[in-house]
Image: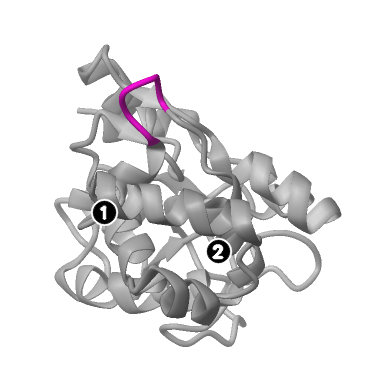
Amino acid sequence: MLDFCPPNPEDRHREHRERDFLQLIGDTYFTLMEALPREDAEIAIGSKVSLLGPNSAIIDCSTVLIGYDDLSSYAKSKLGEVVENIVREKEKVFVEFFNTAPPVNIRFHTLELLPGIGKKTVHKIIEEREREPFKSFEDIKKRVKIDPVKVLVDRILRELKGDERYYLFITPPPWVRRSRRDIVVFNLLEKLYEKVAGGEAAARSEEGAARVDKEGAEKAGG
């Protein structure tokens, strides 16, 4: 959970004008959402919130997609910290990204989309992973001389803000895809979860199978 927000009379979602609501980020696909909390839910900012099942902390069918600009100032201030925690929890998945990241085309590599990574560093990463696959973030840091967590978090934050052409990790919301016809979505996380985490790909149920108010999502697009 990124923030617990009081009712906002100017919010586009009617329920949020009348009730407290939560701002959330999915811990598998980094989906930004809002939802109404159950009255008996025990929740805290920064804690994990279940969206489904008997232990769900939110009211059924109250989840709506939001964009970065919809986040409160406090949620934005917490976003980097929370994204970093998720990346560290999913270390095996993101290490596999460094081991298998593909080229975009003959001249451009997906690794170049990571902030601060130029062609020289890309060549070093490819050379090192061909010699021996990376085993951990620390292994990457030692052999390539970059901070893999920092560059991953920076990239994910850029994608969350919705101004990118290429999306390695995030699936941009519908209104972002409509506004830019040149967007390329790689869906790398889905492939990485299938390869590394096996059944963990089913964790999409917490973000995707949680029923999202499609009307609310469309309104979020303006």
Residue 184, image x, y percentages: 37, 23
Number of other residues with Cα within 10 Å of mark 1, as a class: few under 14, some 14 to 19, many 20 or more: some
175 to 25, vertically: above or below? above
Residue 106, image x, y percentages: 39, 20
Q: Which residue is mark 2?
A: 27
Which residue is at 48% across, 71% downward? 140
Q: Secondary structure at mark 1?
A: loop
- The quadrant of the rendering that contains the N terminus is bottom left
| Side (left or right) of 212 relative to 24 | right
Query: Which three-letter amino acid code belongs to the residue tagged 2?
Result: Asp
Which residue is at 39% across, 20% downward? 105
Query: Which three-letter amino acid code belongs to the residue tagged 1?
Result: Ile
Q: Which residue is mark 1?
A: 117
Residue interval drawn in magenta: 104-109
Determine the residue located farthest toward the right in the rendered image: 199
Near-viewer residue (80 or 212): 80
